[in-house]
Image: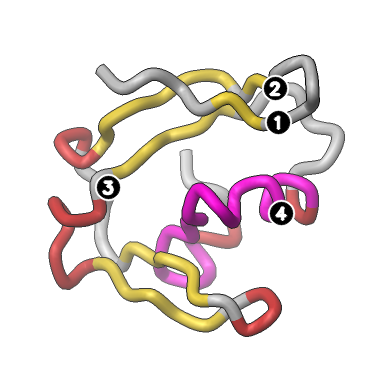
Amino acid sequence: MPEPRHLADGFIHLSSEDQLAGTIDKHFAGRDDLHLVAVDLTVLGRAVKWEVSRGGALFPHIYADLPLSAVIAYGPLRHDDAGAIVLPPAG
């Protein structure tokens, strides 16, 4: 189910790998029910737009439905012993 923000904005907000920790800290701090989805943006073509967002950085936004064919990895949000985000394995 899309977040209400995505429905209101008309696109799916994404973060690059480098932006992920900041996004989780800002919008989802304290949540223990999160899952990560890695997306192959090349599959989506022109539906992806990199737009200025937090701190002037470019963030990927999807202006279409997200087809399962674009999902390359998914799983629950996990952290390693040092607190770094562990990305889900591809497959």
- Is tag 3's residue or tag 2's residue first in the polypeptide sequence? 3
Q: Nearer the viewer, mark 3 or mark 1?
A: 1
Residue 84 image position (x, y, % from top left): 70, 31
Query: In which quadrant of the rendered view does residue 30 lie?
Result: top right
**C-alpha span from label 3 to label 1:** 27 Å
- Whether 18 is among the magenta residues is yes
Q: Using a 10 Å C-alpha cutoff, classify the residue at mark 2 as few (fewer than 14 neighbours), some (14 to 19) or many (20 or more).
A: few
Q: Are marks 1 and 2 in contact (CB under 8 Å)?
A: yes
User: In the rendered structure, which amino acid carries the disc numbered 1?
Assistant: Ala
> Helix, strand or loop at disc 4?
helix
Query: In which quadrant of the rendered view does residue 72 lie?
Result: top left
User: In the rendered structure, which amino acid carries the disc numbered 4?
Assistant: Gly
- Is tag 3's residue or tag 4's residue first in the polypeptide sequence? 4
Residue assigned mark 1: 84
Q: Residue at x 50, y 48 (%)?
A: 17
> Helix, strand or loop at disc 3?
loop
Q: Nearer the viewer, mark 3 or mark 4?
A: 4
Check residue 66 in the rendering and tell me which mark sits there, or answer none.
3
**C-alpha span from label 1 to label 2:** 5 Å
**C-alpha span from label 4 to label 1:** 12 Å
- Is tag 4's residue or tag 1's residue first in the polypeptide sequence? 4
Q: Are marks 3 and 2 in contact (CB under 8 Å)?
A: no
Residue 68 image position (x, y, % from top left): 21, 34
Q: Using a 10 Å C-alpha cutoff, classify the residue at mark 1 as few (fewer than 14 neighbours), some (14 to 19) or many (20 or more).
A: few
Q: Are marks 3 and 1 in contact (CB under 8 Å)?
A: no
Residue assigned mark 2: 79
- Is tag 1's residue or tag 2's residue first in the polypeptide sequence? 2
Chain part drawn in magenta: 7-25
Check residue 22 in the rendering and tell me which mark sits there, or answer none.
4
Magenta span main SS: helix
Whether residue 13 sits left or right of residue 42 in the image: it is: right
Check residue 45 in the rendering and tell me which mark sits there, or answer none.
none
